[in-house]
């Protein structure tokens, strides 16, 4: 396949913008990238696609979301949610206990389809359904695979629902992990941990015993609310990052999510351990837990990426909020812009490439053919020097026309190609009505 007549944004510093560019795809990989005229002469295949001057850029990567929260959109609750602990107990932990395995399937289709519509081609999910843990990750993976999404899954282990369920959660993580082919470039697994404050030392011992000899890392919420930090200091005499790092649960193979209520001491640990931190600006603002010290961490050399925590399925929307949150919090308009671009377009590709073992998030020869087209018509010059401004202030997920993953169209001309969107959304609507009855 050759896509030509495109304004190509490669996200590659060596050749960031190609006017009237083309991308040659073979076997799910980018074979060549360059000027349309040259590649049209060289390409010998029959599948030539005119991009009509639209933007062609790498697919977007979401480093943290919660597929299981899909039914919550529009859902009302009567229980108090005045602070973060109450939000967890009275909203999310109330919802996840009612979920069945098939809800994971429907939630994955809903979230996956909307992600594709917003140009997301790779996502990292953190699942919870404590009364239906076993088989839940496979159900989610099957749905995401049917859509065509590249994904990494884990199950959220926690003490909060008792020892029996905790044991099931360990088994679910391990059995899904062990079911995957290590050479599979579209499906990966991690071991999911809820957070330090819902996992005792004996529970972490059991998890480490189960993970002995495994190369996969951990996907864990870190100091999202101040209560996580206070619990760790009171019970263990350690800050959250210190406690997890002592068990090698933060580092290059793991994801440390949020890190909102962390200090300079912990940032040094995150930097020295080569940790992957994921910032979720819209969720943090919505839950009123504070502002992740992104600028301070980046200055220390911490690798910080960007997720949504399911607050949105649009990464370009998340980029915008990441910019303004840092500017507002630091009362400095010069902070946030470059950092937001770094999180999404430099660090997310680095993280995802490391986890999947294939070049993601950049259009380069030999990289994955995960691409999106946008119907974005710039009314100011879009060049290598100005592309950042267009990405932050101009482009949105709603402009995505096509989504290509592994060299195949998952969405073409805004129509999902792989699954029956109307049928699946009707199923989700019907089931959501039943779920809402138990949540009011």
Image (spheres, helix red, strand yellow):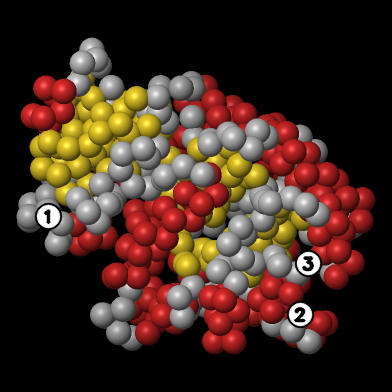
Mark 3 or mark 2: whose residue is earlier in sequence: 3
Name the residue: 59% across, 44% down: 152
Query: Badge 2 local density, few (<14 within 10 Å), some, or many (20+)?
Result: some
The N terminus lies in quadrant: top left
Give SS at disc 1. loop
Mark 1 or mark 3: whose residue is earlier in sequence: 3
Name the residue: 66% across, 62% down: 220
Residue occupied by mark 3: 198
Mark 1 or mark 2: whose residue is earlier in sequence: 2
Q: Which residue is more in the foreground, 208 or 239?
A: 208
- Tell me the distance, in whole angstroms, between the alpha carbons under discs 3 and 2: 9 Å
In front: label 1 or label 3: 1
- Tell me the distance, in whole angstroms, between the alpha carbons under discs 1 and 2: 49 Å
How far across and how far down the image is residue 225, in percent?
63, 74
- Tell me the distance, in whole angstroms, between the alpha carbons under discs 1 and 3: 48 Å
Left or right: residue 131 compared with residue 40: right
- Mark number, residue 383: 1
Give SS at disc 2. helix
How far across and how far down the image is residue 261, in percent?
58, 79
Name the residue: 45% across, 75% down: 301
Residue occupied by mark 2: 231
Left or right: residue 154 compared with residue 123: right
Name the residue: 46% across, 80% down: 300
Residue 384: which quarter of the image?
Answer: bottom left
Residue sticking out furthest to the right: 164
Dots 1, 2 in contact, CB < 8 A: no
């Amino acid at each position: 396949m050759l896509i030509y007549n495109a304004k190509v944004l490669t996200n590659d510093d060596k050749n960031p913008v190609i006017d009237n560019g083309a991308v040659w795809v073979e076997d799910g990989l980018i074979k060549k990238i360059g000027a349309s005229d040259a590649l049209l002469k060289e390409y010998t295949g029959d599948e030539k696609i005119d991009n009509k001057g639209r933007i062609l850029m790498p697919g977007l990567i979401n480093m943290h979301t919660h597929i299981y929260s899909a039914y919550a959109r529009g859902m009302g609750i009567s229980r108090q949610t005045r602070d973060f602990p109450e939000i967890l107990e009275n909203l999310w932990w109330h919802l996840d206990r009612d979920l069945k395995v098939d809800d994971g399937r429907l939630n994955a289709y809903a979230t996956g389809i909307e992600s594709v519509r917003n140009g997301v081609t790779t996502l990292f999910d953190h699942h919870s359904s404590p009364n239906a843990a076993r088989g839940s990750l496979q159900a989610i993976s099957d749905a995401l695979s049917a859509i065509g999404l590249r994904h990494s899954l884990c199950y959220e282990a926690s003490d909060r629902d008792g020892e029996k369920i905790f044991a099931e959660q360990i088994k679910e993580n391990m059995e899904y992990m062990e079911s995957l082919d290590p050479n599979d470039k579209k499906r990966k697994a991690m071991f999911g941990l809820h957070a330090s404050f819902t996992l005792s030392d004996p529970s972490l011992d059991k998890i480490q015993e189960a993970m002995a000899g495994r190369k996969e890392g951990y996907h864990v919420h870190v100091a999202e609310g101040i209560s996580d930090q206070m619990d760790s200091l009171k019970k263990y005499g350690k800050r959250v990052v210190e406690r997890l790092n002592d068990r090698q649960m933060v580092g290059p193979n793991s994801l440390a999510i949020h890190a909102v209520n962390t200090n300079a001491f912990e940032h040094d640990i995150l930097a020295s351990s080569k940790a992957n931190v994921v910032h979720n600006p819209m969720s943090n603002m919505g839950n009123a837990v504070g502002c992740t010290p992104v600028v301070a961490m980046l200055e220390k050399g911490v690798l910080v990426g960007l997720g949504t925590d399911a607050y949105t399925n649009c990464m370009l929307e998340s980029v915008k909020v990441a910019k303004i949150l840092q500017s507002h919090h630091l009362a400095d308009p010069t902070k946030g812009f470059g950092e937001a671009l770094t999180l999404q377009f430099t660090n997310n590709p680095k993280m995802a490439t490391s986890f999947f073992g294939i070049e993601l998030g950049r259009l380069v020869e030999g990289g994955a053919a995960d691409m999106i087209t946008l119907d974005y018509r710039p009314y100011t010059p879009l060049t290598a020097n100005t592309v950042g401004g267009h990405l932050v202030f101009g482009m949105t997920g709603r402009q995505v026309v096509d989504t290509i993953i592994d060299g195949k169209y998952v969405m073409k001309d805004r129509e999902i190609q792989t699954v029956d969107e109307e049928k699946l959304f009707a199923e989700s609507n019907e089931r959501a009505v039943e779920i809402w009855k138990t949540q009011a």
